[in-house]
Amino acid sequence: MKKFILSLLALSAICTVEAQTKSGGIDAKMMEQLRKGYTASPEQKAIKNALASTSIATLATNGDNLAMCDTHFSHRVKTRGITSQKSSGRCWLFTGLNVLRAKMINKYNLASMEFSQNYCSFYDLLEKSNLFLQAIIDTRSLPLDDRKVDWLLRHPIGDGGQFTGVSNLIMKYGIVPKEVMPETFQSNNTRNMRTILSLKLREYALALRNAKSEKAASAMKVKQLTEIYRILVECLGVPPTEFEWTLRNRKGEVVSTEKYTPKSFYDKFIGEDLEGNYIMIMNNPAREYGKVYEIEYDRHVYDGDNWLYINLPIERIKEMAIASIKDNTAMYFSCDVGKFLHRNKGTLDLANYDYESLFRTSFPMNKKERIQTYASGSSHAMTLIAVDLDNEGKPRKWMVENSWGIKSGYKGNLIMTDEWFNEYMFRLVVERKYVPQDVLDMLKQKPTMLSAWDPMFAPEE
């Protein structure tokens, strides 16, 4: 027995030595070299002391760029009011509805107007639940560790999204004024509700995969969605099917009082084809320009549309954005909002923070490389409403209406330099009339299908 134990100890010692000296590991010699990176020089000690008690963003704030930028814009869409998505990931929905809200305010000369985000959220979560469950049925023959099945189970539901969700949901279910279906605590604070829904959907997914037949799975799905519907009603309220609403002009005078369904309300006050009139544009230098791409499962409604976009150079996108703003038409816009954002000033400016000087290193990756390595991607949607053009018609800065409340940023808006726009703007949704014919002709292509886990296509929140 002693010999056996000694043999095990000897083998363990050999394995330990091999593990420590295996090529590619950090051995003692390498560690000695690495330790030379910190020499305890006065400069390094000062930075170390500062970082021990102060945020990196505060220390990296560029003292030469503290002054507020000029807030004048040569061209601005007429809008009124700032919305707030509170503690939810519904920026895509607020943005899409804000684009339509600006249209209605200008068309009917209203003092203010806000559509019910909660109404659309209800059907969004119901449709996403069905999308997930039906996708599980469609992939029942694949093993549980298949990449597609794995992705579905990792992302059963969320309240993030993109413009096709806005268009498909509204064209199917219509919209209502906010006062008809106001926000609830759960719609404003969605984390716990999402957790509960995700848990149920994953449970249901296993049941569907174990169903005896596809027919049995489909029948089971209806019962599962009935339970999901009940949970949504208890969290968000009962979505109205008919309501009475009074239209008042900017002076508060009554123009009309009528009964509507959500569909008839949309048809009367907006009435445009959201699915056919809007073109999705992307600036993704990691993909070939002039091509059309589609993202699998990047939709909100199972029988709706995947996100489909034309990939274009940034300058072509700017041309369309400027044309739309000049014509008093706001746009759905999304970007990597967390990069170089100065929250107090409400500016997005590459000069806001000097991380290179703070850490005495460089960050040389370009936009393409940041996308390829997951260092940057579209994370937040807002409404593009203004541009400031120089005497030659070139943009100097842009402004978006945000959905973080009136106290956030610059009066609820964010101002971005044109240089920041180049680096961190990704998606724009433009009305067809502002898109040049050569770009529209690109839609005749057969789209290249990209996987749902492509680095560019996490839902915007």
Image (cartoon, helix red, strand yellow):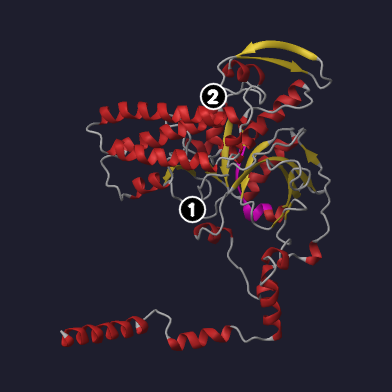
Three-letter residue code for mark 1: Pro
Three-letter residue code for mark 2: Met
Front-most of 161 and 49? 49
Residue under pointer 1: 455
Q: What stretch of residues is rendered in magenta?
A: 421-429
Residue drawn 55% across the image and 23% down it: 239
User: Which label belongs to residue 201?
Assistant: none
Q: Is residue 427 magenta?
A: yes
Residue 277 seen anywhere in this rendered image of the structure: no
- The span from disc 1 to disc 2 (Cα, nearest Å) is 29 Å
Disc 1 crowd, CA 10 A, few/some/many (<14, 14-19, 20+): some
Q: Is residue 281 above or below residue 79?
A: below
Residue under pointer 2: 171
Front-most of 280 and 231? 231
Marked residue nearer the N-terminal end (1 or 2): 2
Q: Is residue 225 above or below residue 45?
A: above
| Relative side of 211 to 258, left or right | left
Residue drawn 51% across the image and 32% down it: 124
Q: Is residue 210 above or below residue 11?
A: above
- Residue 249 appears in which quarter of the rendering? top right
| Relative side of 21 to 235, left or right | left
The C terminus lies in which quarter of the figure? top right
